[in-house]
Image: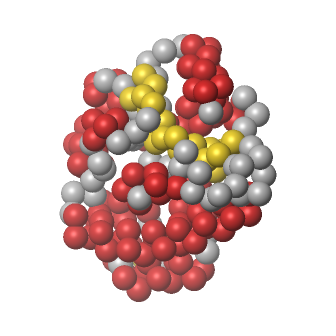
Amino acid sequence: MFWGKKMKLVAITGSIGCGKTTLAGLVRELGFVVYDVDGWTRALYQKSEFVKLILQNFPEVNDNGKVNKRKLRNLVFGHNDELKRLEMLVHPFLEKRFFETIHRNCRYDDIFFIDAALILELGWDRYCDLVIVADVDRETQKQRVMKRDNISAQDFEKILSAQMDNKEKILRSDVVIETDKPLGVLKIELLSVIDEL
């Protein structure tokens, strides 16, 4: 597609708790490479250059020279101006990693997957051959997140309000996979999608 090579790039996305990570894990089990953008973000917080940048812009989250992620989350979720400010620091690092990864692999005749909650928000969907969105009903989504992250319903709503609505993600994606099914069924659905590529 965009890269003018044989490589195909497939995005897996979805709002928090919708099953994006589960789908990505199943794709790995099927033997494909999946790039985890959330993992790239976590790794940023181990880089001194990035930590210094965050602490300069958000001194209130300084915890003995490290970023207190809980304080940072509480500071930005529910406060759009602060969230935008954080994104302006994070996104350039992610974009650099994204393009480096793609250029490193574009000569291969293979299918690569990218697992990214913000693929549409970042505009990276325009570089993808296919966008898969994970979906589930709102109550299941809420219960999954509250249990997994040990947070309140109020915190869940704050996080959700900071993300693009999953209904919009569905409208902008090529394939929707409902994730409230057994893993074996989800794997079969993924295989069917991959076979079409």
Residue at (30% x, 69% y) in the render: 84
Q: Nearer the viewer, residue 84 or 154?
A: 84
* In the foreground, 86 or 58: 86
Question: 107 above or below 110?
Answer: below
64 lies above or below 33: below
* Residue 188 in the figure: left or right of residue 133: right
Q: Residue 185 occupies which quadrant of the picture?
A: top right
> Image quadrant of residue 91?
bottom left
Q: Is residue 18 left or right of residue 31?
A: left
Image coords of residue 115 (percent x, y): 55, 46
Up/down of 46 relative to 141, above or below = below
Residue at (53% x, 68% y) in the render: 95
* Residue 20, percent from left and from top: 49, 36
Displayed quadrant of residue 154: top left
**Of 151 and 103, the residue lying toward us:** 103
Q: Position of residue 43 (x, y in %)?
A: 61, 63
Relative placement, left or right, of 72 versus 131 is left
| Residue at figure coordinates x 43%, y 81% from the top left | 55
Q: Is residue 91 visible?
A: yes
Q: Quadrant of the C terminus?
A: top right
Q: Where in the figure is residue 34, as x and y percent of width and height?
A: 66, 45
Q: Does residue 144 appear anywhere in the picture?
A: no
Residue under the image location 70 percent in, 55 percent down: 5
Instruction: Check the image and report above or below for 79 versus 32.
Output: below
